[in-house]
Amino acid sequence: MRIDPLSATLHALADPTRRALLARLALGDASVTELGAPLDMSLAAVSKHLKVLEGAGLVSRGRHMQWRPCHLEAAPLRDASEWLEQYRRFWDRSIDALADHLATIQATKKTKVKK
Amino acid sequence: MSKQKARSNVGPMRVETPADQAVLIMERELDAPRELVWSALTDPTQVAKWYGGHGFENPVCEMDVRPGGRWRHVMRTPDGQEFAMELEFLEVVPPERLVWQNVGHDAPGAVGPHNNHMTVTLEALDGGARTRWHLVTRFKSLADRQAAGAIGFAAVLEEGTEKFADVLRELAR
């Protein structure tokens, strides 16, 4: 099954370790060793979480430097929150228009009855 | 009646996002009897007048309102972009409950999940003069993957388009 970017983003965020890694990267690029230092887990485990984040497009790795720093990619999360915000606004607008439509048809009915 | 009340003959929209589910709940009170709201929701000629909101047009709206029936829709945004949608009715209980879901998954580059499941429940208020609109959207692809998990979905939604680093700091708590 094809996974939409929003689902991939939220799946990546559903784990507390991955959220902690992103929060650390929000402060600046870091190596796997630096990322693992405050966490009570092996570097292999940290790498596994980073793979998920890379898969979701939330983290990229430097190519040229030997320590291949991890870099935060903000766009997917911004896209996700914008999509949800748009969805909410879509219904807010629609129901505004629905309420106005209901007012119009009721006003029309009343006018007809008066005549 | 105060001016403001006359202008908005509906209460403000209430939005809920249960923390552990990929669900968005939107509730509103409408100043019309339930039967009228039901027909405005299930008569394609009327749906075309309000779907999307003011400034939006709906050049195609074909509804076969019965369980398993299709809803083919094309919406045009104020800047002229057209979005084709294909939906399917799952439950039809006049005048109180309508359930439908997306079946068209073809929107290229769409960011959002494509199998959303929507339930509108209409409740009669004030002896039938008014109606409570209760819309639950279930983002199924998120629920299946447990991706909505404790914080992800609700936090992202609450934060809206706030500064990204702030969102992350919040998430990391």
Image (tube, coloured by chain):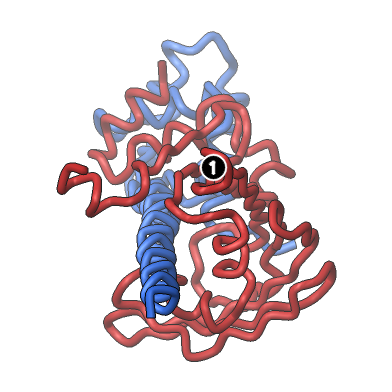
Chain colours: A blue, B red
Q: Residue at x 69, y 52 (%)?
A: B96
Q: Is residue A20 above or below residue A73?
A: above
Residue occupying the far front of the picture: A115
Q: Chain of mark 1?
A: B
Q: Give the image quarter of residue B95.
A: bottom right
A3 left or right, relative to B5: right
Q: Quadrant of residue B105?
A: bottom right
Q: Which residue is mark 1?
A: B24
Residue positioned 49% across, 47% down in the render: B130
Q: Is residue A14 left or right of residue B89?
A: left
The residue closer to the viewer here, B151 or B45, is B45
The residue drawn where x is 39% and y is 43% is: B13
Classify B120 as above or below B90: above
- Give the side of residue A103 with respect to residue B109, left or right: left
Res A52 → quadrant? top right
Viewer-nearest residue: B144 or B133: B133
Residue A76 seen anywhere in this rendered image of the structure: no
